[in-house]
Amino acid sequence: MLSEKSRPVIEQTIGVVAERIPFITPEFYRSMFAARPELLDGMFSRSNQRNGSQPQALAGSIAMFASWLLSHPEGYPDELLSRVAHKHASLGVRPEHYPIVHEHLFGAIARDLGNAATPEVVAAWDEVYWLMADAMIRIEARLYGSQANDAVLAPFRVAAKEQAGVGTVALTLEPADGTPLTPAVAGQYVTVQVRMPDGVHQPRQFTLVPGPEGTRRIAVRLDERGEVTPVLHHDVRVGDVLTVSNPYGDVVLPEGDGPLVLASAGIGVTPMLAFLDRLVRQESQREVLVLHADRSVATWPLRELHELLVAELPGARLETWMETPGQGDHDGFMDLAEVRIPAGAQVVLCGPLPFMRAARSAAVAQGVPGRSIAYEILGPDQWMLHDDARAA
Ligand code: FAD
Ligand code: HEM
């Protein structure tokens, strides 16, 4: 809980801090990576630094946390903290890293705010930082403690590599040493760390899709302008060894017997495949509306598996939107207004941000409460910074 001393200071300065974040964060990262270049080797994504998405996410979340503390004195934004802690744990963030981020973030704040960074202002924001850090450190400790092993990353051999639609390959990874395998919950992801041609290691997350017992299977969509997916597509061969984290992620199958809507676009199909597989194993009778949008039938990742899983569920029905006319039930982008969402449904969305914004708005317009809509973003969560509905 924020102290009575800091509360008025945060109230007075949150506006200016939030406004300065886009300027503070590049300076924070510049100074941190100059002092600790090893953090860019295996932990931080170089591309997210270059395209600016991650700087906005980290710093923006601190301002969001502060405004939450002001409006909810008794609680914490659990959804935000949990999402970040899962991501951190998949990357091996440890308590000893927090003072490093603190030092460089607060140095950047002091330099940016100049005289406005009085000792009171710095002390109040320090309190916010450590409240948030301590909350995440606790969640991360619990997550690390619930794994079947103490390793952040373990070696996995590529046992199979198959084309899974145009632009996507599926990799089946089997343990390459004796590290015990933590069972994954449907919807979770792993971090895969890959050595780049210049020797630097780069981590990326991939959602686990159904695969043989005792393996991890991922479906990787090629991003031609990216760093890691071109290597996984073009260079990695069966028999190669990759380093892979334990499974993390808190967007999981909504429990209960109520109706479900699983709406995906493109590679956003991956968590849906895991959910459907879980429902099949449970012999679920739930009503499941499975919605998928793609450029064409050919680019639809793991299409056969998606269709097969739906066919195995008595209560499931699949409806598609294809940009290539005539290939799906509907032409063009998905429009949830064309679908009758079952009363009381839990909705899970996964795909590009514009898709999820549109789908979420359409679901809300049909009367689905915001809390019944979950989503997985296949990148840093910039959405939460703009989505007032979720902060409420
Ligand atoms: P990156 O190197 O990360 O580049 C991404 C983009 O950054 C590029 O398209 C480019 O536009 C931009 N960029 C790079 N350099 C610059 C520059 N210098 N200037 C401007 N822009 C630049 N992906 C899947 O395929 N399947 C999954 O199941 C999956 N699940 C995920 C689950 C989670 C929880 C998360 C967070 C992500 C998931 N992803 C998944 C996405 C995946 O982790 C990668 O982000 C994605 O594959 C791109 O990786 P990359 O290294 O090829 O591209
Ligand atoms: C990602 C917040 C401390 C390393 C993130 C994200 C947020 C965040 C919001 C984006 C999560 C998403 O994908 O949606 C914070 C806050 C911190 C903190 C508020 C302090 C209170 C740290 C520390 C480290 C760290 C101490 C380790 C040095 C990372 C990394 C990512 C990340 C590597 C993934 C980013 C990428 O490469 O794109 N953090 N974080 N964070 N954080 Fe933190």
Image: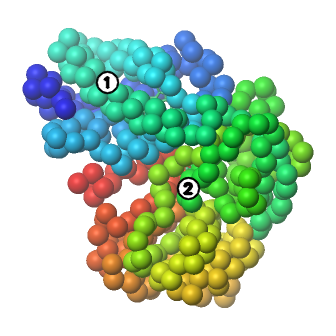
Per the model, the C-alpha gap separating discs 2 and 1 is 30 Å
Q: Is residue 291 above or below residue 348?
A: below
Question: Camera-side residue: 22 or 390?
Answer: 390
Of the numbered discs 2 and 1, the one sitting upstream in the chain is 1
| Residue 227 percent location from the top left of the image | 71, 40
**Does mark 2 have its CB less than 8 Å from ligand 1?**
no
Front of the two marks 2 and 1: 2
Which element is circle 1 on? helix
Q: Is residue 128 above or below residue 262?
A: above
The residue lying at 57 percent from left, 78 percent from top is 283
Q: At label 1, which amino acid type do we have? A: Trp
Question: Camera-side residue: 230 or 27?
Answer: 230
Q: Quadrant of the C terminus?
A: bottom left
Q: Is residue 211 visible?
A: yes
Question: Camera-side residue: 275 or 60?
Answer: 275
Q: Is residue 170 above or below residue 228?
A: below
Q: Residues within 10 Å of mark 2 (few under 14, many from 20)?
A: some
Q: Is residue 140 left or right of residue 41?
A: left
Q: At label 2, which amino acid type do we have? A: Val
| Residue 34 percent location from the top left of the image | 56, 14
- Residue that label 1 marks: 130
Badges 2 and 1: C-beta atoms under 8 Å apart? no
- Residue that label 2 marks: 185
Question: Camera-side residue: 327 or 342?
Answer: 342
